[in-house]
Image: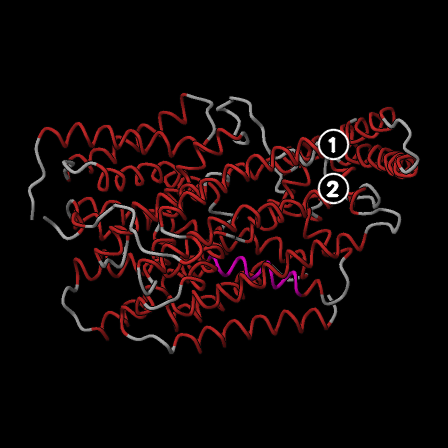
Amino acid sequence: MREADSASVKTPSEKLGIFGSWRQLYLTVLVYTVVLILLLHLLGSYLLSEGSC
Amino acid sequence: MTWIDWLIFGVYLAGVVLFGVVQSRKSSGIEGYFLGGRALPWGTIGLSVMATQASAITFIGTTGQAYDEGMEFIQIYLAQPLALVVICALFLPFFYRAKVYTAYEFLERRYDAKTRSLTSFLFLLSRGLATGIVMYAPAVVLSTLMGWDETITILVIGGITILYTVVGGITAVVWTDVLQMILMFAGIGVALLVLFQELPSEVGVGDVIYIGGIHQMWRSIDWSWDPTNTYTVWSGLIGGFFMALAYFGCDQSQVQRYLTARSLTHSRLALIFNAFLKVPMQFLVLAIGVLLFVFYHFERPPLVFNPAEAEALRTGVQQETYAQLEEDHQVLHSRRRSSTLDLLRVRSTGADLSIQQAQIREYDLELADLRKRSKELVALDRGRASSDVNYVFPSYLLHYVPTGILGLMIAVIFAAAMSSLDSELTALSSVTVIDFYQRYWAPGASERHYLLAARLATLFWGLLATGAALYAGQLGSLIVAVNLVGSYFYGSLLGVFLLAFLVKRSTARGAFWGLIAGMLSVVSFSILTEVSWLYYNVVGALVVLMVGSVLGSEKHHEPA
């Protein structure tokens, strides 16, 4: 097997302080993105309703 | 510009060169020159990744876009955090453990020299001349701001960037990027503060938000399913995801960044840092554009912000039409200003405002229509599309910001241009030396030999980019063609890497022909459909994966 083929793609279990593990950090980014989209949507809707009521 | 502005700008230029040269002493040898000795910490790399992505045109162009169309541009970036997670989990372990210098070097380890050379060549082709545009576009705008000839501006941007990049390699690039990114953050904050201060005293923060809302400028999310529209949440999440994967995962200017990290953990943290900060930063940059829109409710904006284009219209064959547009613009703006101030006065009484709001919205639409017609006149007069969107923010800086702030903001735009250019130069140099010179012409030469070759390659690409920028006006169609090759190639390149990571049985034959099929598919897709360019990367990547998987299953890959 070639060197590049042997690299693991598994999420490492290394500890990362307040973020817990890599898996938890990745999950945090996922949640963050969803929250960001919802916030932008809600903010836009609120500000639009303020300006168009 | 006053002497204080020049002083601030001069301190920035001198500081960048000195800082770059001093920092470059920390590394040595070819690994030091291209990868900083693989010893840099995540915070430094994280800021450098961000600075590389933030070009000057992103900085001045997106504020102009927000001025014209509101916050919807932000949707392109929404999938970036997710793409960065995929790169952390999938791409980085392969690159890091293979101990490669370039992304394309990995493809020879995984497939063969042909696949590596084709991808490296396409990278050099698409980026070589395109780098001239990275310099040319902001140089034109900066020349307007500073009253310099375009040639001088290009030579200053090119000369200084070449100097510290040739001398210091990636270490100088990364550390100057940090300095430049901090300056950009400061610039964004100062621009927002100054904009608020320049508003009439009776207009508060709530009023600014309120006026922006009347014209729907704060609308950030469009949920409609329209693949021909680039600015919808679905285009952003699907097309933007693949675009970010291709840019951060396969473009040497970014891959080289995180290969400089002292460990895999530091590489990952640098990208996660960007995953959290990029969208908020872009939100603030776009908010500058919306604030400009509100600001110009109280001050009369130019109908055409680019002074050269405005002058050409005033004196050209379209002068009568343009004069009429300007007259209408003055009258309409004056009415909108009065209506807006009246609205804000009545608003504090709690009365019903729907009639006044409808009136202002009507004025907004009429003014937007006048601006659209003036852009069409520019296109008619000059034979090419108007670039006025890039002049909205610079025009404001020139006419309204106080002494000292103008110098700072010019330094910020220079920083954005230079931080992208230096990364391109060192990426082009690393691909030239590692993927071609070392691979084919001089394998097994000494460290000193490669270091000299690396410096000469950086100098060569720097001079070529500067030359391309100086003649960008005349190279128009060639540069368009080169950029097209880049856009056709990007998604397909991503497909090759995904094939390498995800399809274990894939072969060099599958990867090579997959890449060709992917590029041809994107060309056909762009000609035959009206779908947004954001989806090109999706098509390219998926076609490579399919073709590569089918061809790979015919004959299994021979292990080395």
Element marked by disc 2: helix
**Chain letter for the residue marked with disc 1 in the picture:** B
Pointers 2 and 1 within a single chain: yes
Q: Residue B214, how many percent across, how many down?
A: 76, 32
**As rendered, which of A22 and B380 lies closer to the eye?**
A22
- The residue that label 1 is drawn on is B215
Q: Chain of mark 2?
A: B
Residue B394 lies, with reference to residue B508, above or below; the image says below
B413 falls in the magenta region: yes
Badge 2 vs badge 1, beta-carbon distance below 8 Å: yes
Quadrant of the snapshot with the C terminus of chain A = top right
Residue B342 in percent (x, y) is at 92, 36
Q: Earlier in the sequence, mark 2 or mark 1?
A: 1
Residue annotated with mark 2: B293
Residue at image point 47% right, 28% down: B532
Query: Mostly what secondary structure, the magenta segment?
Result: helix
* Left or right: where B130 falls relative to B229: left
* Residue A28 occupies quadrant: top left
Q: Is residue B34 magenta?
A: no
Quadrant position of residue B436? bottom left
Amino acid, disc 2: Phe
Q: Tell me the kind of residue under disc 1.
A: His
Magenta-drawn segment = B408-420
